[in-house]
Image: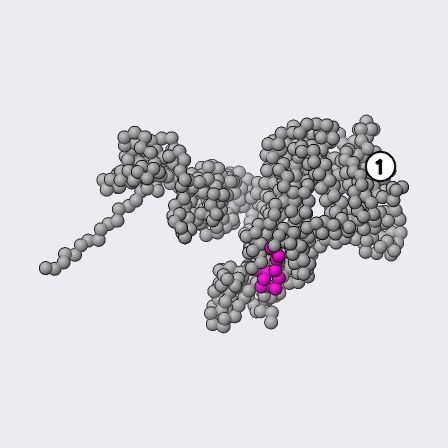
Amino acid sequence: MSKRLRKPIKKEKDFSDKIIKILSQSANKAFNYKQIGAKLELDDTQSRNQIIKDLKILAASKKIIESEPGKYLIKAVSQDYYEGKIDMTGRKTAYFICPEFEEDVFIPTNNLNHALDKDTVKVYVYNRRKGKRPEGEVIEVLERHKTDFVGVIDIQKNFSFVSTANPKMYTDIFIPKDKIGEAEQGDVVLVHIEDWPARADSPFGKVIKVLGKPGEHDTEIHAILAEYGLPAEFPIEVETYAQKIDTTINEVEIAKRRDMRDTLTFTIDPKDAKDFDDALSFKKLENGNYEIGIHIADVSFYLEEGTILDDEAYQRATSVYLVDRVVPMLPEVLSNYACSLRPHEEKYTFSAVFEINQKAQVMNQWFGRTVIYSDQRFSYEEAQHIIESKGNTIPEEISIIGSSYQVSDEIVAATLKMDELAKILRRNRMNEGAISFDKVEVKFNLDQEGEPEGVYFKISKDANHLIEEFMLLANRKVAEYIGKQKKTFVYRIHDEPNEDKLIAMQTVIAKFGYKIDFRNKGDISKSLNALMEEVNGKKEQNLIDTLAIRSMSKAKYSTDNIGHYGLAFDYYSHFTSPIRRYPDVMVHRLLQFYLDAGKSVDEETYETKCLHCSTMEGLATHAERDSIKYMQVKYMQNHQDQEFLGVISGVTEWGIYVEIIENKCEGMVRIRDIKEDYYTFDEKQYALVGSTTNSMLQLGDEIYVKVKNADLVKKQLDFHFLRRNE
C-alpha cells in the first residue's frame, strides 16, 4: 500500500507579542478577543481562534490577567518590561540601554515602533535564554529626546520631505504642503516633529526656520547650533534689559568691598580673547610669604536672580566656542565690557586671596567681594617669553604679538615667582595622583570671510600652567571651605575611570608596545601619566591621548561630592569663569550667602540645576567638535590634489580611519577602495588583512592618502588610499 503524501501542516501564527503590546499601550483597559482582532485588523475565523488560544496561554503563564470572563488586561508589573533609553546604530537598528541589564538589548528595525535615538522608552524583552543575546521590542515611547531636527528639504508638488545628515536618524520627516513656510527647494531647514501617526512610515513635521543653502559657511555653522538646540542670538528683550543695567563703579559699592586697587594685578589670556574673567594679584609680605589673589569677574552682582537676563543665562548655561565665533552666555555689554577685567579699568570682583609660603603651601585664606584695577594684560605668548627668558633679556618694551607696551621690573618679578610656585603646585598634584592630559588642540587661521587659511596646534606651556594652577587652587579651596561645613554646594565631580574602557584601551596601545598598570587607583593614574609622557611627540600621540580621555568618566556638576579623580582632589568646584559658565555664578551666590551666615539651601533644587548645566555643557561640547570637523573638511576641500601622510587611527569592518599627521584632519578609506588586495576585517588584531598577500593594515601604520570626497553637510572626509609609508 502506497503511502499517502501528506500536505505540510501550516504553522499557526503566534500573536502573543502583539497582544501584549496592545494591552501594554492601554494598561488599565480590558479587551476581549474581538477588540484585539480589530486592533490587529484580523477578522477571519482562523486568526480569531489563534487570538483566543494565545490569550488563554498568556493568562495561564500570568503575563496577562483575565479581569472578567473573556476580558483581559496587562499585569501592572511584569518582569519582561523595562524602561530605558534607545541607542541607535547607523544601520537602522538600535540597542536598549537599561541599568537592569548587564549587556545592551538588541532592537531590530521592525521593533523600533517609531522610537528615535536617545528616546526614553518602555521595552518588552524576550529571548532571554542563557547564552542568547536578549532582544526587545519598543512598546511605548515615553519621552522624546528631541523633536527638532536639521536637514535638507526636498519639495514635491503636494508635500515635502526633510532628510538629515545624522546617521542615527533613520527616517526622513514628512512636511505637508501648508507647513513648508518660506523654505525653497534644497534649503537647510530646522523642522519640528508634530506627530507620528501609527501607520505612517515617517513622522509629520513643520518647518520652523530656514537656515540657508547647503555648504554656505553661515548656514552650516547655524545648522550646527540648531542641531543641538543652541541659540545663535539673544532675544531682543534680553538685550534691551542688559543695556539698561548700571555698570558704573561707584563709591557706595566700593565701600562694601575689600579694596585691592593698589595691589599689583594683571591678566593672562589667549591673544584673541575678548572677555577676561580672571586676574591675578601679587604682593610680597614682610614675613617672606606671598599674598596671591585670584580675582574673578563678579557676574552675580549684575545678574540678579529672577530676571529675564538670569533666566536666559541659566537656559544657555555655558558659552559655546565654535571655530569662527563665540556664542556667549551673557550679552556683550556684560561679557566683553562690564564684567571683563580689562586693563587700566576698575572692576568689581569676587576673590580668593591666599597667603602662600616658599613651598607653595597655603598658610591663610580669605574669600569675598573686592574691587581691583588691572595694571597689565598679557597674552600667553608674552607671559611665556618672560618665563623663558627669566626676565634677563627683556628690553623696556617688548612686542610679541604686535602690541607694544611697558613691562615693569615688578611685573617681571611677580610673573617669575608665580611661575615658580605654580610648578610646585603642579608637581604636588601629580605626586598625589592627578592625571596630566595636555591634549593638542587643533586651531585654524581664518581670513576675514571665515575661510581656513591654515591649521595650527595649541599646546600648553608654562604660562598656561601658571594660570591653570592658581585657578585650580581657588576652585579647590572654595569647594573645601563650604564642603567641610556640610552645606549644599555645586561641585565639579569626576568619577574613577571605566575599567572596561581601560581594558579596551590596553588592547589597542599594546600594539604600540605600551601598557597600563591596573593594580590600584593610584597605579592607574601614575601609569597614564607615564604613558602620556612616553607618547609625547610620537605619531600615535593623538590617537592614544584620545583613547585615554575616552576611558575617563565624564566630569559633571552635582551637589553630591564624590571628589575629582582626574585632578586627585577631594573637593573641587567651578569658581573662576562666571562670564562663560552658569555653575560658577551659582557658586558665587552660594559662597556669598554662606559667608553671610546663611543656612544650607535646598539640595534637590540645586541638583536639578546641576543636571541642566551638565546637559547643556555636553551639547556645547558636541557643537564645538562638529564645528572643528566642519572646518577640517572645508580646509581639506581646498587641498584635493595634495598627497598627505597619515596614521591609521581606527579600523572597522567597512574601512580604516586615517588621521593626517600635519593637520590632524581625520577621514575614512573605504575597504572597497583599497585595490592592492582583497581585505577583510580581523577583529582580534584590529586590522585589515589581505586575503592574497596576508599583509595587514593596522592601527599606527603610516600611509599616504589623497582627498576623495569632502562633504561639508555631513562633515565627512573620504580618502583615496595611495600607498604605504615603507
Q: Nearer the viewer, residue 261 or 462?
A: 462
Which residue is found at the position 57% from the left and 51% from the top?
Answer: 499
Indicate how the structure is coloured in the image: one colour
Left or right, residue 39 beside residue 448: left
Left or right, residue 688 beside residue 602: left
Q: Position of residue 38 (x, y in %)?
A: 30, 36
* Residue farthest toward the front in the current orientation of the protein: 519
Was residue 517 drawn as part of the magenta stretch in this picture?
Answer: yes
Question: Over which residues does the magenta segment extend?
Answer: 508-518
- Asked if 701 appears above or below 327 in the picture, the reply is below
Rendered image quadrant of residue 249? top right
* Residue farthest toward the left in the current orientation of the protein: 1
Q: Position of residue 645 (x, y in %)?
A: 62, 65
Q: Amino acid at mark 1?
A: Arg
Q: Nearer the viewer, residue 324 or 605?
A: 605
Left or right, residue 74 beside residue 428: left
Was residue 625 drawn as part of the magenta stretch in this picture?
Answer: no
Pick the quarter of the image with the N terminus.
Answer: bottom left
Residue at the spot of label 1: 261
Which residue is found at the position 79% from the left and 31% from the top?
Answer: 248
